[in-house]
Image (cartoon, rainbow, N blue to C red):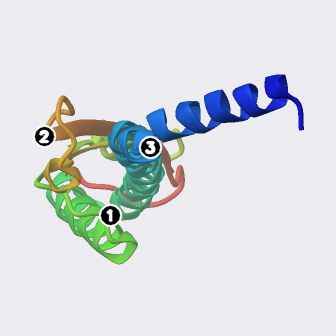
Amino acid sequence: MTRTARASGRRLGRRLRQDRGSEAIQAAIVTPILITFLCLAVAAGRIVMAGGKIDAAAEDAARAASIERTHGAATSAASQAAARSLGDAGVACSSRSVSVDAGGLTVPVGQVGYVTVTVRCTVPFGDLLLPGTPGSKTMTSQFRSVVDAYRSREG
């Protein structure tokens, strides 16, 4: 072996010894970044899934309200349908509200009326333990359902 080969082998050995522990430092830097990315993905997934389920709850509530004959019964049916739909879907709302515009129930028979329901649900994110994320997000969905034109109504 030549003198140059031995010298470069020694230099390589010194360089390798100087890199000892660098993998642990890299892992310590990369791990929190990966955990943050994972938490953000979970939060985004929760927003998308909750949004779809809240849309379905508003649709169910509007349909239930449009079947009723009175404003009071429509409001009650819409609230119950939204609660049932969100409960069945597994959406945990820290606060929930259902508002009903049942003006279509007072339209004369033979004319088309509509019932509009708005569902608001506050979805919590406190369990994600991700700094900088809000504790919750209020999501709103609205759906309009047709009232049967030839069905008897209140009034």
| The N terminus: image quadrant | top right
Residue 21 drawn above or below residue 6: below
Q: Residue at x 63, y 27 (%)?
A: 11
- Where is residue 136, by image quadrant? top left
User: Residue 104: percent from the left, percent from the top?
Assistant: 37, 40
User: Residue 74: percent from the left, percent from the top?
Assistant: 25, 58
Residue furthest right in the image: 1
Residue furthest top in the image: 4
Task: Give how far apart the Cα atoms at labels 1 and 2 are.
Answer: 37 Å
The kind of secondary structure element at disc 3 is loop
- The disc, 3 or 2, on the residue closer to the chain's N-terminal end is 3
Q: Residue at x 46, y 49 (%)?
A: 45
Residue 28 drawn above or below residue 8: below
How crowded pointer 1 is (Cα within 10 Å; few <14, some 14-19, many 20+) is rated as many
Mark 1 or mark 2, whichever is nearer to me? 2
Nearest the viewer among 63 and 127 is 127
- Tell me the kind of residue under disc 1: Glu
Nearest the viewer among 113 and 111 is 113
Q: Where residue 68 is drawn, which disc sits there?
A: 1
- Tell me the kind of residue under disc 2: Gly
Nearest the viewer among 15 and 137 is 15
How crowded pointer 2 is (Cα within 10 Å; few <14, some 14-19, many 20+) is rated as some
Q: Where residue 135 is drawn, which disc sits there?
A: 2
Q: Residue at x 73, y 26 (%)?
A: 8
